[in-house]
Image (cartoon, rainbow, N blue to C red):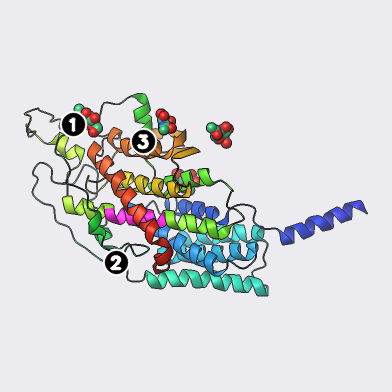
Amino acid sequence: MKLSAVAIVAGAAVVNAVYPGDIVQYWVDQSGNLVNGTIIGGLASPPSAWYGAVVQGAIYEAAVTSRRESLAFQQLAVSHAAHNAILWAFHGTRIYNAADAAIRAVIPAIGLDPTSTAGRDAVRRGQAAARKVANARADDGIANFVDYTYAAANPGIYQQTPGSNPVPDTPQARFIATFSGLGDITRFRASPPPGSLNSTARTAFDTQTAYFWRESSINAWNRLATSIIGDSLAARVLDSAKFYAQLNYALANAGIAAWDNKFFYNTWRPVTAIQRPGVWLSTGRDVSDSAWTPLLRPTPSHQDYPSTHSTFGGAAAAVIRAYNRGSDVINATLSSTVTLDNVGVITRTFTNLTEASLQNAASRVFGGIHFTFAGSAGIALGDAVARETLRLFDAHWEEF
Ligand SMILES: *[C@@H]1O[C@H](CO)[C@@H](O)[C@H](O)[C@H]1NC(C)=O
Ligand SMILES: *[C@@H]1O[C@H](CO)[C@@H](O)[C@H](O)[C@H]1NC(C)=O
Ligand SMILES: *[C@@H]1O[C@H](CO)[C@@H](O)[C@H](O)[C@H]1NC(C)=O
Ligand SMILES: CC(=O)N[C@H]1CO[C@H](CO)[C@@H](O)[C@@H]1O
């Protein structure tokens, strides 16, 4: 009978189905969802990048150790690696249910029964990958207490900004062990910042730019990468895992390097400079305005120079460019949901990586939270850190 034949074929297809999308992108997206708001309320910059690198390191390890297995096996191993790495990074938080739901949702689509012999092997392989990363990262410095004391409130020196935390965020972040053997982060120190103020006059497009790039850079640049890669690597788990591991290692190293620079130069934010009473510019110009408020508020709770947002963008652009065989040309569309001022969803299309990275840096100047030179220095810093991370990756990725 025709009907039952169809039913049998359909049934068999379900049992043997292979998850049709890119499993690495699935977990990039899931881990982004887990940290950008509803579940744990967002993360400070370097920890958000550290977390992405830990998860992608575990995924890549699982992809490498299961590279000779079936696609479904690789997908199941990668999923368990991602799940366990996420929970290792966040145990003790409300993330458990969400991480369990994320893996429960994808297992049927992978189509390899986790209780079969091969399935159990895949689960073990994934869990072992996450354990390896956890062991390598057990004492990497992210959990250490490092104190901070404000220096005297002289021009140029960082001070607490309105609405910010009492002490700059994560002072320990500049000491976190780098990924992929990057080593001494202080060799990426930028030249000292110039001292003058820059204009922040904005067009409507510039204002939208400030809002558009406001979200977590880790999420935005992972999504931009996914928009470029699409489903081209869906059947090549190892290649996908390698790309996202490189991207997220570079982002994590960029965050550590930005923090090293921030705490070394310890420079003030625009709001501190503009609200400072009296004339203090060497030109004699009076820029003082005690009521001045930036568009993006509150100003993040850490020093101005360099902009971590710009550092992340410079690093991500460099990794995507390398994947693009050195070409700057892309055709990518990115949507951003902006909660601040109820702006809503903004969608932009980018034809080149340089433009995306420059716009990302400029967004912080238009937002009134960074000086222009903090953005330029950030892009250069991120680019240098990412290139070195890529150079070291093949030989050192397994140091995580
Ligand atoms: C959180 O991040 C995920 C993954 O990048 C994204 O799909 C989602 O739209 C983001 N949510 C918000 C509220 O920005
Ligand atoms: C860019 O991608 C969009 C959507 O996939 C497509 O419609 C458009 O033709 C592409 N543009 C170029 C220049 O390739
Ligand atoms: C890069 O993108 C911007 C904005 O879309 C465009 O103005 C510029 O011409 C592009 N540059 C190149 C080299 O394609
Ligand atoms: C008024 C002012 O200082 N504008 C400068 C802002 O920064 C850009 C980029 O460095 C310069 O081109 C402007 O002259």
**Residue 168: x, y in percent?**
22, 52
**Residue 265: x, y in percent?**
17, 50
Q: Earlier in the sequence, mark 2 or mark 3?
A: 2
**Residue 131: x, y in percent?**
46, 72
Q: In the rendered view, does 341 fall on the left or right side of 5?
A: left
Disc 3: which residue: 359
Q: Residue at x 46, y 60 (%)?
A: 56
From which residue to which does the magenta span run?
248-257
Label 2: state its secondary structure: loop
**Residue 312: x, y in percent?**
35, 48
- Quarter in which the N terminus is drawn: bottom right
Callout 2 amino acid: Gly
Gap in Å between the C-alphas at discs 2 and 1? 39 Å
Ligand 3: give its quadrant: top left
Question: Number of numbered discs present?
Answer: 3
Disc 1: which residue: 291
Disc 2: which residue: 141
